[in-house]
């Protein structure tokens, strides 16, 4: 099975589940008990269902626990061999484990014949165990294979959607920046030159390297450059207060997140107020999560007709869903005089 291509050359998330996790062990045990019930229903004699189920459950549950423990230990090594090889290795290990446990069970049966009853010959019992376990394990491996293919397609789709969302954000910013520079070329050439330099730095930071996530430090620098460009255009009408000293600057964040929110706050808030206003960017850490809030005043009876306010929020929400799933939230709190966007996402310093 081919691995999914990624910008950093790494494979997507591991295809095999984490067999060391308590949740995975619980699911394996529940599935094993369902298998025991099905096998018992297929072979029990009338009036002996509970007895046969107890025997089958003991055998299957011990097999499930032993197999899960082995896969927990070999999973990191198996995945290094390649995705297809990992599935084959796990299949072979589980089948061999079934046969070994079947042999141990047979030997116990010969010693304690009254406690464990196996109505079959030695070879027949091992053959039945091999056939049944191979079918069940093959079905489980097939499920994991299909699940891994689905996860791979989700990763590729997520990468494509992130690229599309970035393509939507960048032209909007570029058009506003170029208009700002054009308006300054005659009235203040020196400031126009500074704006061109800032725009070049911004393009170098965002367009030079394609990546899904960046550090908070880099993201805040990009937003600060954008603030300087807008400050040249709006003057004293624009004030931005940064309360981000508590944020860990090495934390990773989806790129082009804070700058579009700042742009949104200025375009839909500050510009529509004759006296201007202040945008407040606040960041703090809450346990394993980071919280960033962008707050701006809004004109009560003035709104843009472009719908960009909702588009920017929708784009960022989609990107956080793609990056973190249900672990992140992107909320909007809007009143008659204020608009707030609150980002909550896991604290992570590892490179994307």
Image (cartoon, rainbow, N blue to C red):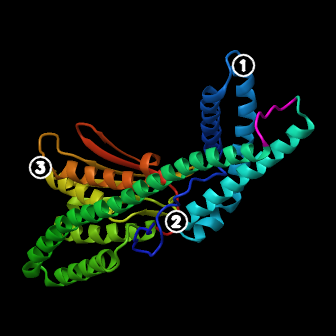
Disc 1 and disc 3 in contact, CB within 8 angstroms: no
Q: Position of residue 34 (x, y in %)?
A: 60, 33
Q: CA distance from mark 1 to mark 3?
A: 75 Å
Q: Mark 3, mark 2: which one is toward the viewer?
A: 2
The overriding secondary structure of the stretch rendered in magenta is loop
Residue 125 visible in the picture: yes
Q: Residue at x 22, y 57 (%)?
A: 266
Question: Residue 189: x percent and y percent?
Answer: 14, 84
The residues bearing labels 2 and 1 have C-alpha atoms spaced at a distance of: 43 Å
Mark 3 or 2, nearer chain start: 2
Q: Position of residue 72 (x, y in %)?
A: 68, 55
Which picture quadrant has residue 62? top right
User: Residue at horizontal 11%, vertical 44%?
Assistant: 302
The answer to which quarter of the image holds residue 109 is: top right
Residue assigned mark 1: 48
- Which stretch appears magenta? 115-121
Q: Which class describes the residues within 10 Å of circle 2: few (<14), some (14-19), or many (20+)? A: some
Secondary element under disc 1, as helix, strand or loop, is: loop
Q: Which residue is mark 2?
A: 84
Residue found at the far left of this picture: 186
- Between 346 and 35, the residue placed more toward the observer is 35
| Frontmost residue, 173 versus 246 | 173
Mark 2 or mark 1: which comes first in sequence? 1
Determine the residue located farthest toward the top in the rendered image. 47
CB contact under 8 Å: marks 3 and 2: no
Question: Magenta span has 352?
Answer: no
Q: Is residue 269 visible?
A: no
Which secondary structure, mark 3?
loop
Residue 304, label in figure? 3
């Amino acid at each position: 099975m081919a691995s999914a291509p990624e910008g950093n050359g790494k494979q997507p998330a591991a295809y095999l589940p984490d067999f060391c996790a308590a949740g995975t062990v619980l699911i394996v045990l529940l599935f094993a008990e369902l298998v025991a019930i099905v096998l018992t229903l297929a072979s029990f004699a009338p009036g002996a269902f509970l007895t046969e189920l107890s025997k089958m459950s003991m055998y299957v549950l011990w097999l499930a626990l032993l197999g899960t423990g082995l896969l927990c230990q070999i999973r990191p090594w198996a995945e290094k061999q390649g995705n297809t090889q990992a599935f084959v290795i796990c299949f072979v290990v589980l089948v061999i484990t079934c046969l070994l446990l079947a042999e141990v069970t047979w030997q116990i049966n010969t010693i304690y014949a009254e406690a464990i009853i196996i109505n079959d010959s030695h070879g027949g019992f091992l053959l039945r165990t091999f056939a049944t376990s191979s079918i069940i394990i093959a079905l489980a491996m097939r499920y994991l294979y299909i699940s891994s293919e689905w996860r791979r397609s989700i990763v590729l789709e997520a990468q494509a959607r992130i690229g599309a969302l970035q393509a939507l954000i960048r032209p909007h910013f570029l058009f506003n920046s170029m208009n700002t520079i054009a308006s300054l070329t005659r009235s203040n050439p020196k400031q126009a030159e500074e704006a061109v330099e800032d725009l070049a730095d911004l393009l170098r930071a965002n367009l030079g390297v394609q990546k899904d996530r960046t550090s908070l430090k880099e993201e805040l620098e990009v937003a600060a450059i954008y603030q300087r460009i807008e400050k040249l255009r709006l003057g004293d009408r624009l004030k931005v207060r940064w309360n981000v000293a508590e944020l860990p600057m090495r934390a990773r964040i989806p790129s082009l997140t804070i700058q579009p929110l700042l742009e949104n706050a200025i375009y839909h808030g500050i510009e529509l107020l004759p006296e201007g206003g202040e945008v407040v960017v606040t960041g703090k850490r809450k346990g394993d999560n980071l919280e960033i809030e962008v707050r701006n005043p809004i004109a009560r009876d003035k709104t843009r007709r472009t719908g960009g306010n909702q588009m920017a929020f929708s784009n960022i929400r989609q990107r956080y869903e793609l990056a973190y799933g249900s672990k992140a939230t992107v909320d909007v709190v809007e009143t008659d005089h204020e608009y707030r966007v609150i980002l909550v996402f896991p604290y992570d310093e590892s490179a994307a």
